[in-house]
Image (tube, helix red, strand yellow):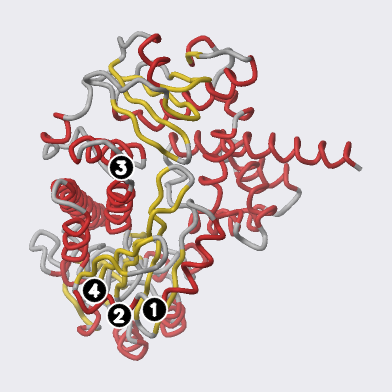
Amino acid sequence: MPPTLGALTRAPRLRLNLLTGQESLDRQVEWVAVSELEDPTPYLAGGELLLTTGVRWAAGVPDLRDYTRRLAERRIAGLGFAVGVVLDETPAELREAAAEFGLALLEVPRRTPFIAIGKEVSRLLAKEEYEGLSRTFAAQRDLTRAALTGASAIVDRLAGDLGAWVLLLSADGTARHAAPARAATRAAGLAGELDRLREAGVRASASLNSGSERVSVQPLATGRRVRGFLAVGTGGRLGSDERTLVNAAVSLLSLELERTVHSVTDRVREGVLAALFAGALDPLHPGAERLREVLPDEPVVVAVAEGTGPAQPPEGVLVTEHDGRALLLAPAGTDTGVIGGVLEGPVGVSDPSPYTELSAALSQAERALEAARGAGEGLLRAGDLPGGLLGLADTPAGARMAADLLAPLMRQRTSAELLASLRAYLAASGRWEAAAEALGVHRHTLRYRMRRIRDLLPGDLDDPDHRAELWIALRVHGAREASTRSQRHHAG
């Protein structure tokens, strides 16, 4: 959760004085913006603490009532006015307008630089993010430990961590375990959603509102067969940390419901591996000592195949199912003969990788699997394949990653316009004039579109890593679109 205005006013080194808006102290500050424009609202997203010195007011004070009204309508967190720079005190007209429109107005003393306020907001944001991650990792650890006891313990732990009701259902919709127990009565009302999920397949999920309550339902599946369902009811939308915890529970419960000859310990290990590939567990976190005990030492290799063979994996080699395929995790030095004996070919094997790059290793293995299938090979390593990063354009894994990254834009009615604007902006290395000229639009039109794109995408467009991922995703998406159009043309 971002810091509040109250937290900033309580920071002694900032020496901020709240002039109006006592009722707004719990308002969250998403970011700090500095602007001396007479109308900065076109450049604000809402939620900012806007700072100004009034330097342009020296020659003649503008209509401060209209200025304040626009800021209040933009729903900024508050306005900070620096005294002792241009004006010795905050204008009375500004105070009156802020009180009229319910805008929090803070007086910033001359000895408090604006950058100090920005740094404090950044520090509080980073502190909150770290604490959130720590809580999530601790909850994941407890959830994994609960899996040693059984499905009921996982459900009870998840309900306690989320402060929600959680319902474990069998494949036919019967309530198997509920936390709290009275949540079992919810099963009948979910029958329609379960029918739709059975038709949609194992990768589908459902979310519905019931009054002030939000309910999410996910299938629990191993391979292509649904073994049950997990329903979670909360008072509002789950945050990213809570969604990560639910995903970890889904992975563990999916494996728990599978009736195999494996021992409980083996099933839990497979559940941990499935959660690891789903990104729900971090083996490098300081609190994950027990998790590292069941995982191979890094670097590791990832192997993907359509199914497992007759051989049981040797010590230190883990196997599970993910998206209908068999996944294997093994130490980097594992012989290909061992991998080929455990998995049913064709098989794709990644390059050696640390756990921090496990997602990339999985993509390498999937690409190698596609190449092995096309070449009629039993096993292929990613290092034996030609091409570079853009070679992912020829694989289903690359197409899926690109679609996931661009999904927030592709869901919009003006998706083609947004994708074209993002492509032009990245191709021009962020130069507005060049990008706007390439699109044939005015630069202000492009700025508006890019503000919308920034709001929709979860990453930071100023981060070079995120820009590189977006560029590759656009290339992959473009190649797939061109291939689809070509196939339609020839079919016609």
SS of the residue at dot 3? helix
Q: Is residue 201 left or right of residue 313?
A: right
Q: Identify the residue position indicated by label 3 in the image.
A: 275
| Dot label at residue 150 | none
Position of 471 compared to 112: left or right?
Answer: right
Q: Which residue is mark 1?
A: 188
Separation of residues labelled 1 and 3 (CA atoms): 29 Å
Pick out the residue farthest to the left.
12
x and y percentages locating residue 66 in the rendered image: 46, 83
**Which residue shows up at 44% across the image and 53% down it?**
226
Q: Toward the viewer: 315 or 127? A: 315
The residue wearing badge 4 is 106
**Amino acid tagged 3:** Ala
- For disc 2, the marked residue is 185
Which is more foreground, mark 2 or mark 4?
2
| Nearest to N terminus: mark 1 or mark 3 | 1
